[in-house]
Amino acid sequence: MYHKIVQDGLVYLDPFYLLTRDNAFVSNFIIALQNERDIVTIDEEVKVKAYIDKIRAIKDVLKRDHMKVAFFGR
C-alpha cells in the first residue's frame, strides 16, 4: 500500500519534473521573457528557479529505496 502511494506521488510529479528537467531551457526562457518583453521580474525568475530546485529535491527523495519519510509544509 505504501509503495503505491509513493508511486502515485512520482506519477503526479512527472509532468512537472519533465518541464524542469532541463533547467537551462527554463532559465533561458525566463530570461528571454524578462529581457525581450519585460514580462518577468528578476524576483519572479528567482522564485521559478527555487521551485524547480524544490521539485527536483522532492522527486529525488521519493525515488530513494530507503528512508521513505518526507516532510512537506511551510
Image (cartoon, rainbow, N blue to C red):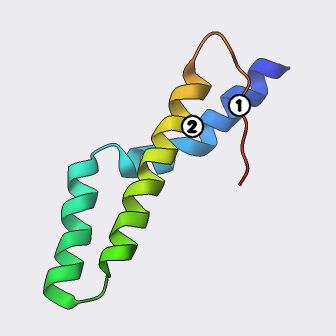
Residue that sits furthest to the left in the current view: 36
Q: Earlier in the sequence, mark 1 or mark 2?
A: 2
Q: Quadrant of the C terminus?
A: bottom right
Rendered residue at 18%/63% (across/down): 28
* Residue 69 screen position, x and y as percent: 74, 24
Left/right placement of residue 53 relative to residue 34 reads right
Vertical placement of residue 33 versus 49, above or below: below
Q: Amino acid at mark 1?
A: Ala
For numbered disc 2, what is the local secondary structure? helix
Residue drawn 30% across the image and 76% down it? 42
- Contact between marks 1 and 2 (CB within 8 A): the answer is yes
Please rate how many residues cluster around mark 2, counting C-alpha atoms within 10 Å: few if below 14, some from 14 to 19, many from 20.
some
Query: Quadrant location of residue 72?
Result: top right
| Residue 70 image label | 1
- Residue flagged by tag 2: what amino acid is it? Ile
Q: Which mark is residue 58?
A: 2
Disc on res. 21: none
Q: Image point 70% across, 34% down: which residue?
A: 8
Quick one: 64 or 71, which is closer to the camera?
71
